[in-house]
Amino acid sequence: MNRNLTFEISSCKDYFEQIVLPSVEAYNTDPLSYRKALSVAIFCWQFSDWIFNSYKNKIKKQFQKDGIIIKDCKDYQSQLMKKQYFSFISQIAIGAKHLKCSDSRIQTISSTQKETGFFQGLLGLGTVTYLTIKVMSRRYYFQRELKRCIDYWNVVMIELDIYCSN
């Protein structure tokens, strides 16, 4: 039985254009919102399920060209997690859904938090606040890592010949 459990969202193109991109836009209008950051991380990471299950054979062939065997979505996600930005976004998405992330396939984030720092601008010294991801002693900006994920998805959508409005 093929049931529609997603309220008219029936393709990865629909999911990307109606769920992922609007959640990115909502987050970008309020980049210090924890709720919007967690929501967009979940939607961005879950897109890997949608695209893999929609284009399984094409994705398997693309990876096979590089000598990588993809058997299922878990294998595909493991390959994505090798990219630092997907490692971060997946950990945040899994942590948002389950409180913690115990997936051994991915790099461990030390913490996520809102941080305020100083910068020197044309008008003098000022402050700026970001949502940050800390891994050991390094700091990454959530907004920048999210953008890298979205840029990757846009490239994949083009490579798979999926029309994309972005």
Image (cartoon, rainbow, N blue to C red):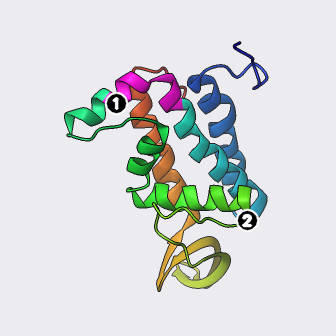
Q: Which residues are magenta?
A: 51-60
Residue 74 at x, y = what percent? 48, 44
Q: Is residue 59 magenta?
A: yes
Q: Amino acid at mark 2?
A: Leu
Residue 159 lies left or right of residue 66; in this view the side is right
Residue 47 at x, y = what percent? 57, 38
- Front one among 80 and 156: 80
Q: Residue at x 73, y 65 (%)?
A: 99
Q: Secondary structure at mark 1?
A: helix
Q: Residue at x 38, y 48 (%)?
A: 79
The residue beneath circle 1 is 60
Q: Quadrant of the N terminus?
A: top right
Q: Residue at x 68, y 35 (%)?
A: 19
- Front one among 39 and 116: 39
- Front one among 4 and 47: 4
- Asked if residue 87 is positioned above or below residue 158 in the image, the reply reads below
Q: Amino acid at mark 1?
A: Lys
Do the residues bearing badges 2 and 1 touch, measured as CB atoms within 8 Å?
no
Give how far apart the Cα atoms at labels 2 and 1 are: 32 Å
The residue beneath circle 2 is 99
- Front one among 65 and 132: 65
Mark carried by residue 92: none
* Magenta span dominant secondary structure: helix
Question: Which picture quadrant has residue 157?
Answer: top left
Residue 132 at x, y = what percent? 59, 73
Q: Residue at x 36, y 23 (%)?
A: 58
Any part of residue 85 in sight: yes
Any part of residue 144 in sight: no
Q: Earlier in the sequence, mark 2 or mark 1?
A: 1
